[in-house]
């Protein structure tokens, strides 16, 4: 990345790299918005502050730069020739942080979709990726809806079973009272205590 620049130029270039509102992010957001999706950005309440959050569909989208997140086998994920140890450590830390964040989000019930920078290079390629992304989001939304319906159904079933059990218990108590009546003297004595 900074192999052909002096220290000052390299420092200047690196300081210009943004963590949010990057070109790939803006491209994805614009494409999703054009397809009717609405979303939140950089939600601070979620681990890792995902780039795009879609609560309706239960989806978070991470738009990753190939270099910064160490996209395996990608031609844009080149390793600099200077300060090799620093860059290897930095990229390894980024990858580890991505894995931990993904695990936390999945534990919270989110579906994670990663969009790589290289998938958005070129107009046709970007358009195709955003279209498949829209399909992935809809699919995840359907899955979320099915899970919620199953949860609702199981809660309703459990409630019905509880009501039936209470009815059976009341009927059994009535039957026992009829079969074995309690003498009046015992009833009065138990009420006085």
Image: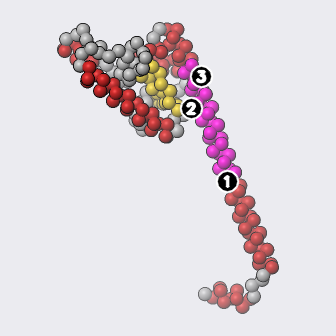
Examine the image and state in which quarter residue 148 appears.
Answer: top right
Q: Nearer the viewer, mark 1 or mark 2?
A: 1
Residue ID for mark 3: 135
Whether residue 189 appears in magenta in the rendering, the answer is no
Question: Who comes first in sequence, dot 1 or dot 2?
Answer: 2
Residue ID for mark 2: 57
The residue sitting at 73% across, 60% down in the picture is 164
Query: Viewer-proximal residue, 190 or 175?
Result: 175
Quarter the C terminus occupies:
bottom right
Which region shows up in magenta?
132-159
Q: Helix, strand, or loop for circle 1?
A: helix
Image coordinates of residue 173 in percent, x first then y, are: 74, 73
Residue ID for mark 1: 158
Callout 2 environment at 10 Å: few (<14), some (14 to 19), or many (20+)? many
Q: Helix, strand, or loop for circle 3?
A: helix
Q: CA distance from mark 1 to mark 2?
A: 27 Å
In the image, is 40 to the left or to the right of 180?
left
The answer to whether mark 1 and mark 3 are in CB contact below 8 A is: no
The residue sitting at 29% across, 27% down in the picture is 89
């Amino acid at each position: 990345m900074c192999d052909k620049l002096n220290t000052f130029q390299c420092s200047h270039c690196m300081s210009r790299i943004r963590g949010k509102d990057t070109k790939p992010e803006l491209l994805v957001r614009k494409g999703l918005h054009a397809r009717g999706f609405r979303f939140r950005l950089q939600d601070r309440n979620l681990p890792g502050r995902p780039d795009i959050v879609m609560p309706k569909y239960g989806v978070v989208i991470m738009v990753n730069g190939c270099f910064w997140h160490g996209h395996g086998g990608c031609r844009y994920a080149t390793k600099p020739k200077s300060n090799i140890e620093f860059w290897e450590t930095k990229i390894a830390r980024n990858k580890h942080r991505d894995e931990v964040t993904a695990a936390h989000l999945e534990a919270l019930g989110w579906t994670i979709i990663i969009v790589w920078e290289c998938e958005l290079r070129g107009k046709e390629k970007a358009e195709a990726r955003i279209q498949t992304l829209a399909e992935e989001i809809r699919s995840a939304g359907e899955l979320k809806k099915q899970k919620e319906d199953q949860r609702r159904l199981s809660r309703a079933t459990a409630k019905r079973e509880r009501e039936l059990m209470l009815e059976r218990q009341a009927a059994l108590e009535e039957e026992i009272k009829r079969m074995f009546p309690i003498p009046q003297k015992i009833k009065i004595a138990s009420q006085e205590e």
